[in-house]
Image: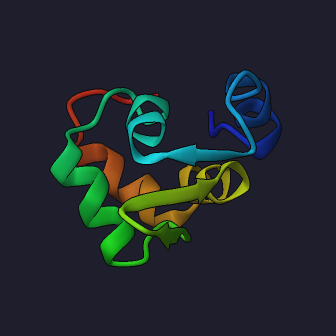
Amino acid sequence: MEKGKKHYKELFKDYPDVVTLVQFREMLGGIADSTARKLVRTNAVKHFYIRDTYMIPKKCVIDYVTSEHYKDYKKSLKVQI
């Protein structure tokens, strides 16, 4: 059964509207820092880069985890949300 945006909105409700890279990694089940950076650098996840910090809107995280890219990509992850 595929999880929809409503499921992820509920799952991520305690996170702020804009998350840091550390929070993003946590939201995706504890993925590695290098993996998270690769996702933002390749623009798989929309984000802002302010000073030395990646800022990722929670809506963009939800859009990503419900996307086709994540559907294919999560098969290679050790931890899945």
Above or below, comparing residue 75 to residue 29 in the picture? below
Q: Quadrant of residue 59?
A: bottom right
Percent of width and height locating residue 41: 31, 74
Q: Quadrant of residue 10?
A: top right
Name which residue lies at 49% across and 32% down: 27
Task: Give 68 or 18, whichever is nearer the viewer.
Answer: 18
Q: Residue at x 28, y 45 (%)?
A: 75
Q: Position of residue 71 (x, y in %)?
A: 45, 54
Above or below for 65 versus 42: above
Res 13 → quadrant: top right
Number of numbered discs: 0
Residue at 47% from the left image edge and 28% from the top image edge: 81
Q: Position of residue 46 (x, y in %)?
A: 55, 71
Looking at the image, which residue sits at the far front?
51
Question: What residue do we see at 27% from left, 36% from top?
Answer: 31
Image quarter (top left, top right, bottom left or bottom right) of the N terminus: top right
Q: Name the colouring of the figure.
A: rainbow
Percent x, y of residue 58? 68, 48
Q: Residue furthest right?
A: 6
The single residue placed furthest to the bottom in the displayed view is 42
Judged left or right of residue 26, residue 56 is right
The answer to whether residue 13 is above or below residue 28 is above
Left or right: residue 33 compared with residue 57:
left
Question: Relative to 39, is 67 on the left or the right?
Answer: right
55 left or right, relative to 70 = right
